[in-house]
Image (cartoon, rainbow, N blue to C red):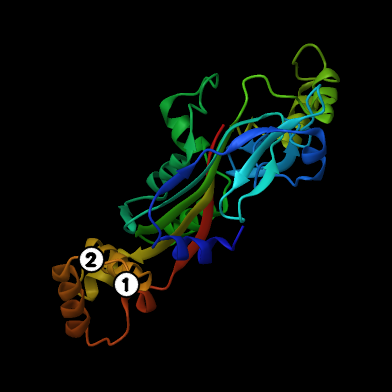
Amino acid sequence: MLPVKCSLFLLLFFPKCTFELCTDGTPKECQDAEFAPGSNLAGEGFDITSMEGKGAFVINMNQWKRNDQACTLCSNPYMDNRKQKLPLSVVDWRAKRSCSSKVSSKVYKSSESLMESTTSSIENNWKMGLNFGSASNLMLAGTHSKLAGYSMDKTKSDKFRFTTQSVSCEYYSYRVSNTPTLQKEFLDSVNQLPKVYSPQSKNSYYHLIDTFGTHYITKVKMGGMVNAVTSIRECEAHLEGIEVSEVEMCLRVEASATIRIKTESSEHKHCQTKKDKSGRKIKFSNHFTDRYEFTVVEISI
C-alpha cells in the first residue's frame, strides 16, 4: 500500500467504485499467487486500552489451502487485476475506492470527550461482557494510548480545548469468517491457563491478555484516516480576540485548501479578516502549532 498520507490525498480526486472479483483458484494458481494486500491485518490481538495491535495473532491468517488444495483468488484492480489469494479465515473481500469529499472537523471541551471520540473508529460493542459502569466505559477505551497521554498532559497545566481535522479514504474491506482457524500458539496458551481464575492464577491470565490483547480484529476497512489534533489554550485565544470555534473553522478551511477541497467563501473571508486584525500574516496552522498527528485504520473487534 502507498504511504497513508500520500495515498489518501491522491485518491480524494477519484470517484467511488467497488469491485467484487473473487473466484476459486486451481492448486497451481493458488501456490503461485501472493496474498491480497492487508489480508493479514485481521485476526490480530488488540488492546482496547492502548488502541494498538499486539502483533500476536488469535486467528491463523497464513493458512489459505482448502482440503481440495485450492483457494479463493481475487483480482486486484489497483494492481493490474493481478490475482491474489485470501487466507481461509477471510471472507467478503472487496476492492473499494471511497474518499471523503470534505475535511471533518470538531471541537472537544475535554481530554475525556476527545478520547471517547477515538473509539468511533472501532465498530461493534467492545464493552459487551465487561461489567463496568458508564463512567468506567468512558475512560477505558484508549486510556493508555499516546493521544490520551498528550491530551491529559495539556489539561493538567491549563484550560485547553482540542480541535480535530481528519480526512479518510478506503481501498479494501473484508471480514473474518464466522468459523475462523485459530492460531496454534493462541490455542496452546488458552489450554495452558489454570481452569479457575483466582488470586493465585491471575498472573497467568494477565500474561495472556498482555500477549494477545483484550479483543481481536474481525473486520478491516483498509486505507485509513489522517487525523490532526490541535491543542488551543483558551486564555491565549481570548487575548487575541478569537473564539476556539473560529480557530477550528479556520484550521478546517486551511486543511481543505491543502488538499484542494472547496469551502464556503464566507468562511475563507472570515478567517482572512481575523488574520488581518491580529496583525499576523501567517496561517492559523502555523500559529497554533501544538499538534498531535496520527493515522488510523477502521476496524471491528
134 or 42: nearer the eye? 42
> Mark 1 to mark 2: distance in Å?
8 Å
Quadrant location of the N terminus in the rendered image: bottom right
Specify the amino acid type for callout 1: Ala
Residue drawn at point x = 45 percent, y = 60 percent: 11
Q: Residues within 10 Å of mark 2 (few under 14, many from 20)?
A: some
Of residues 223 and 238, the one nearer the viewer is: 223
Q: Is residue 161 left or right of residue 124?
A: left
Coordinates of residue 255 in the picture (x, y in percent):
35, 68
Of the numbered discs in the image, which one, if any, rests on residue 201?
none
User: Could you say whether the residue bearing mark 1 is in a helix, strand or loop?
Assistant: helix
Callout 2: helix, strand or loop?
loop
What residue occupies the far top of the structure in this picture?
A: 196
Farthest residue to the left: give it.
266
* Of the pair 162 and 299, the residue shown nearer to us: 299
Query: Would you call the spot at circle 1 few (<14 residues within 10 Å), some (14-19), or many (20 or more)?
Result: some
Q: Amino acid at mark 2?
A: Thr
Q: Is residue 99 above or below residue 116?
A: below
Residue occupying image coordinates x 32% and y 79%: 283
The residue to which callout 1 is attached is: 257
User: In the image, residue 179 lies at what x, y percent?
Assistant: 67, 19
Quarter residue 41 falls in: top right
Dividing the image into 4 quarters, which one contains the C terminus? top right
Q: Earlier in the sequence, mark 1 or mark 2?
A: 1
Asked if the residues shown at circle 1 and circle 2 are in contact, with their CB atoms under 8 angstroms apart, the answer is: yes
Tell me the residue at 18%/68% (across/down). Answer: 267
Can you tell which mark lies on residue 263? 2
Residue 215 against residue 114 in the figure, above or below: above
Whether residue 154 is visible to the viewer of this picture, yes or no, is yes
